[in-house]
């Protein structure tokens, strides 16, 4: 690495991200300690009211529900994604299978949510089908509950879990499984003792890629959820736009930010091995910074792959 | 041999069915003459309405296109330069930039949306197309940055030294060596940015203002305030459009990579 | 083209606490094929990069034909580099890679065509001009890198381990080609390598480096036959290196008291006085190995007995590890037509070893 015009090249990025990314986050920190303004905004009178409000039971219930939904759907996603990634990695038609997983996600996010409404709604496809088959007289209410939210969340984030798992398992040396079998392990035993420990990095990446966005979910619970499946994202938006309590919205955002960042750090630290398994990103010997880079690399290449814009040489698989 | 992978195979097939089912239903419904859920015969009337009688939708589409192309372009220029700086040079804010580009990856979208909304109203900026544009550049920039960086990391600094050794000055090195070799990463970053921008709902939802409805926002209000079957037709057109676009993008990228 | 002489004077370079170059001074003559030889991390590449202008030393001078070039940027020096990994521009064809510096200077198309053609012919790549670097073999990439560096008509060509990425056979071949190119264009070549075989076979002179210091500068023969330090002796070729104390000096004949072998006779033009601790060496191919006791035909023959521990046959020669009571010696027996082969020597066999005093020499004086 050289001294040189690096600072010059990087200056626009540094300035833009500082002004439009870091400064807004800092303002959130500031606002969370202020008094709510009458019609949104804040008055510059310091108070801890927002944090007192967080302590109230309504907030705790929403937080609990958010964690429940996020953990539940992440687990389901991983349980589906693992065998899928395994099957894809062992297949001889990897490119085709990858396309099959990715193509549905070339559809707009909201259209995908809408498709589920079209299926599960009272006048939807499923109810139609049930009525036609004589299995139901009245419409069954599939939507607007926690299960619908989890279903759509799983649907939305499946490829983000399948892709890193696939690329990690693809790099796994399957003769190790045969060696384990040869040494007397059962098929499940071999998977448990040999495969899973070796693809830990991929599992962790898949977990982060699904858990984080689900934890901050907003649109899905808004459109297919009911009051019982109200999540933190909805709470923030309501405090912001309906209750006009900006300090509270800021405080909740801050809590989510801290929880996410600290969670990622802890998980990265707990997992000493290469986090990425291969979603991309170069492994560097810089310790934590290297792991962050690798994770970011995986996130980007993964996203690029999902949206279909990755260079065939670089990110496709 | 037949039994090998039978479980994972079953799960995979089930997953693919799960992933495609909603899309199939949408396609089916888009040709449904009836307004309600039940089948009322084959019809193209929703497509006709989509293309001839949906001015708001097309205005939203226009906004989306402007925002996507504009923000992707700006993010690509800024992010590419940043990646070049970070990959090869040492400077004071280097590790700061690396961290700052990483943060958006791990923060839920709603946080970015909320903080930008608070920021924009804090500095008294009127919400509208411009704030949407700024927000899109901000979340696209790290993606471009990291994709270009991934490409740059394939090259050794000696390629820069070779250019300097052969008599190129800083600008010539940038234009004749660095940018050409990075082009696949830059194109990939730009296309990813366009796609992410077209796709974004949450952040846009918070920072948008009157007259700045994008296509996802239009779909959102259609879902919330009365679904017209035109949405079905729109979905199918968008699916086909995205497939066609992505397909040509891939081929274009392959072409660039081979060149 | 005309070569330059290169003088390096008291150059020091540190990276943090690491001293990469420690007061290095070397004089390289016009048109010489000069090698910087040493293990990785010895500072040879750093020195090359300082000459090229990619690094700046903390102090010292680099003179090209007597003029200090340190204040000049890389493109201001009449020096070009062939990089270790070739550093070819992947987006440009072979032709455009070679034409790169001419295009920068905005030379007319006809001149570019003519010159590039000339240099592609020099490296025998005329038929590959339109290919991309990715379509070339390692040896071909190497030649593109050489042509690209030479087209500027530098007076000094720097080569940074240019053959290290090639396989052994190709390396031999490229080495001969490099030598031929050097003979043809006659400019100064400074060649960095960690491979002593490479350095010995092509260089006019070699500087052996270790830990940031130049240990010895000399022709391949000088370096091989009379290494200046233990390190040089061990690094260049295979050798047997031992310590001992000088017992007496009679003219050129010096007697060493050796803990391993008793009395050893060596010759040295300027031996230190009796009582000095020294290291001494004898090359494996200079030791004779026989089943029968050699006749003490002349004065100054060192003779002792041993047991063959391990014979390693490699076609044109056999290498023996021979155990004497207190040490193990490496011995190489060449299988040439004209030598009296004698009966074959096998594992565990008792043998006689002998070498004459002229073939053993002092290396270092120990304190």
Image (cartoon, rainbow, N blue to C red):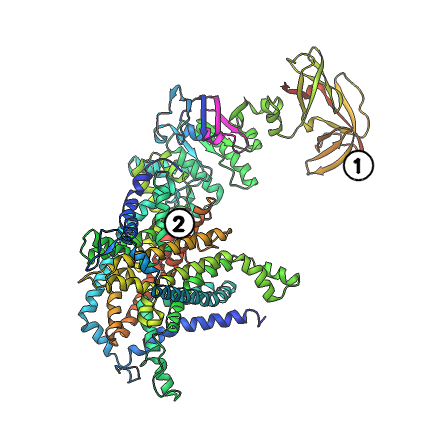
Does B199 sit above or below residue B154? below
* Secondary structure state at the residue bearing disc 2: helix
- State left or right for residue A162 relative to residue C297: left
Tell me what residue is drawn at x 39 percent, y 56 percent. Answer: A260
* Secondary structure state at the residue bearing disc 1: loop
Tell me what residue is drawn at x 41 percent, y 21 percent. Answer: C63
Query: In this view, which residue lies farthest toward the top?
Result: C251
Residue at the disc numbered 1: C348
Tell me what residue is drawn at x 57 percent, y 63 percent. Answer: A191
Part of the protein shown in magenta: C18-47
Is residue C35 covered in magenta?
yes
- Of C107 and B257, nearer the camera is B257
| Res C120 visible | yes
| On-image quarter of the C terminus of chain A | bottom left
x then y, percent, for residue C104? 31, 36
Residue at the disc numbered 2: B150
| Res B191 visible | no
x then y, percent, for residue B162? 39, 37
Is residue A34 covered in magenta?
no
Mark 1, other Cα within 10 Å: few <14 / some 14–19 / many ≥20: some
x then y, percent, for residue B78? 29, 47
Q: CA distance from mark 1 to mark 2?
A: 59 Å
- Of B199 and A120, nearer the camera is A120
- Of B238 and A57, nearer the camera is A57
x then y, percent, for residue C203? 53, 27
Q: Chain of mark 1?
A: C
């Amino acid at each position: 690495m050289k001294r040189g015009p690096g600072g010059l090249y990087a200056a626009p990025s540094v300035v833009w991200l500082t002004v439009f990314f870091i400064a807004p986050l800092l303002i959130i920190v500031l606002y969370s300690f202020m008094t709510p303004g009458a019609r949104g905004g804040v008055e510059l009178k310091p108070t801890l009211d927002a944090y007192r409000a967080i302590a109230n039971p309504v907030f705790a219930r929403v937080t609990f529900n958010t964690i429940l939904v996020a953990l539940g759907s992440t687990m389901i996603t991983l349980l589906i994604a693992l065998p899928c990634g395994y099957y894809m990695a062992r297949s001889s038609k990897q490119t085709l299978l990858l396309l099959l997983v990715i193509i549905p996600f070339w559809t707009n996010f909201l259209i995908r949510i809408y498709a589920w409404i079209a299926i599960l709604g009272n006048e939807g496809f499923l109810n139609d089908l049930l009525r036609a088959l004589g299995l139901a007289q009245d419409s069954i209410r599939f939507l607007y509950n926690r299960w619908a939210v989890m279903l759509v969340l799983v649907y939305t984030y499946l490829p983000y879990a399948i892709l890193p798992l696939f690329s990690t398992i693809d790099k796994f040396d399957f003769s190790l499984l045969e060696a384990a079998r040869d040494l007397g392990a059962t098929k499940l035993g071999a998977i448990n003792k040999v495969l899973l420990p070796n693809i830990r990095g991929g599992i962790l990446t898949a977990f982060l890629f699904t858990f984080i966005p689900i934890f901050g979910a907003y649109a899905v619970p808004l459109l297919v959820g009911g009051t019982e499946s109200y999540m933190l994202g909805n709470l923030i938006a309501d405090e912001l736009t309906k209750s006009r309590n900006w300090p509270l919205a800021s405080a909740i955002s801050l809590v989510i930010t801290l929880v996410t960042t600290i969670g990622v750090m802890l998980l990265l630290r707990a997992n000493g091995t290469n986090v990425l398994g291969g979603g991309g990103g170069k492994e560097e010997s810089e310790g934590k910074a290297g792991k962050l880079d690798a994770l970011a690399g995986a996130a980007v290449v993964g996203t690029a792959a999902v949206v279909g814009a990755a260079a065939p040489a670089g990110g496709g698989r | 041999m037949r039994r090998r992978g039978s479980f994972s195979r079953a799960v995979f097939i089930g997953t693919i069915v799960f992933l495609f089912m909603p899309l199939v239903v949408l396609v089916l419904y888009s040709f449904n003459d009836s307004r309600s859920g039940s089948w009322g015969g084959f019809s193209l009337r929703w497509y006709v309405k989509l293309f001839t009688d949906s001015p708001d939708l097309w205005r939203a589409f226009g906004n989306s296109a402007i925002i996507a192309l504009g923000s992707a372009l700006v993010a690509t220029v800024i992010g590419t330069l940043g990646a070049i700086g970070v990959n090869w040079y040492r400077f004071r804010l280097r590790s700061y930039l690396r961290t700052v580009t990483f943060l958006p990856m791990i923060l839920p979208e709603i946080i970015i949306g909320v903080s930008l909304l608070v920021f924009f109203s804090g500095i008294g900026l009127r919400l509208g197309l411009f704030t949407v544009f700024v927000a899109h550049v901000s979340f696209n920039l790290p993606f471009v940055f990291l994709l270009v960086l991934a490409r740059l990391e394939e090259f050794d600094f000696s390629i820069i030294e070779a250019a300097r050794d052969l008599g190129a000055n800083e600008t010539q090195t940038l234009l004749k060596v660095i940018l050409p070799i990075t082009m696949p990463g830059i194109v990939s970053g730009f296309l990813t940015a366009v796609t992410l921008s077209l796709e974004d709902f949450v952040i846009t939802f918070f920072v948008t203002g009157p007259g700045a409805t994008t296509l996802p926002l239009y779909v959102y209000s259609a879902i919330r305030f009365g679904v017209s079957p035109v949405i079905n037709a729109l979905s199918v057109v968008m699916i086909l459009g995205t497939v066609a676009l992505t397909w040509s993008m891939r081929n274009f990228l392959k072409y660039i990579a081979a060149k | 083209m005309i070569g330059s002489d290169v003088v390096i004077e008291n150059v020091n370079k540190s990276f943090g606490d690491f001293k990469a170059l420690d007061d290095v001074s070397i004089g390289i003559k016009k048109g010489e094929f000069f090698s910087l030889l040493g293990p990785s991390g010895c500072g040879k590449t750093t020195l090359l990069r300082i000459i090229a202008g990619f690094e700046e030393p903390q102090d010292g001078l680099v003179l090209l034909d007597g003029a200090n070039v340190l204040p000049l940027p890389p493109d201001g020096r009449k020096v070009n580099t062939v990089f270790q990994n070739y550093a070819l521009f992947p987006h440009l064809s072979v032709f455009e890679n070679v034409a790169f510096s001419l295009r920068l200077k905005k030379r007319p198309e006809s001149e570019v065509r003519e010159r590039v053609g000339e240099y592609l012919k020099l490296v025998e790549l005329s038929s590959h001009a339109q290919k991309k670097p990715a379509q070339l073999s390692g040896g071909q990439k190497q030649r593109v890198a050489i042509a690209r560096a030479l087209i500027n008509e530098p007076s000094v060509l720097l080569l940074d381990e240019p053959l290290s990425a090639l396989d052994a056979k190709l390396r031999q071949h490229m080495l001969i080609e490099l030598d031929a190119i050097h003979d043809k264009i006659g400019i100064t070549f400074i060649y960095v390598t960690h491979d002593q075989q490479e350095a010995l076979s092509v260089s006019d002179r070699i500087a052996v480096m270790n830990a940031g210091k130049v240990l010895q500068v000399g022709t391949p023969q000088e370096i091989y036959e009379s290494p200046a330090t233990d390190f040089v002796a061990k690094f260049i070729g295979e050798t047997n290196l031992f310590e001992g104390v000088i017992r007496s000096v009679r003219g050129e004949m010096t007697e060493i008291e050796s803990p391993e072998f008793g009395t050893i006779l060596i010759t040295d033009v300027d031996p230190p006085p009796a009582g000095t601790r020294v290291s001494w060496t004898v090359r494996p191919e200079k030791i004779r190995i026989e089943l029968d006791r050699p006749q003490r035909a002349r004065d100054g023959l060192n003779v002792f007995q041993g047991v063959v521990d391990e014979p390693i046959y490699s076609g044109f020669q056999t290498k023996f590890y021979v155990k004497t009571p207190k040490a193990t010696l490496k011995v190489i027996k060449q299988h040439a037509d004209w030598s009296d082969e004698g009966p074959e020597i096998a594992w565990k066999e008792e043998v006689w070893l002998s070498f004459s005093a002229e073939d053993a020499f002092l290396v270092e004086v120990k304190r």
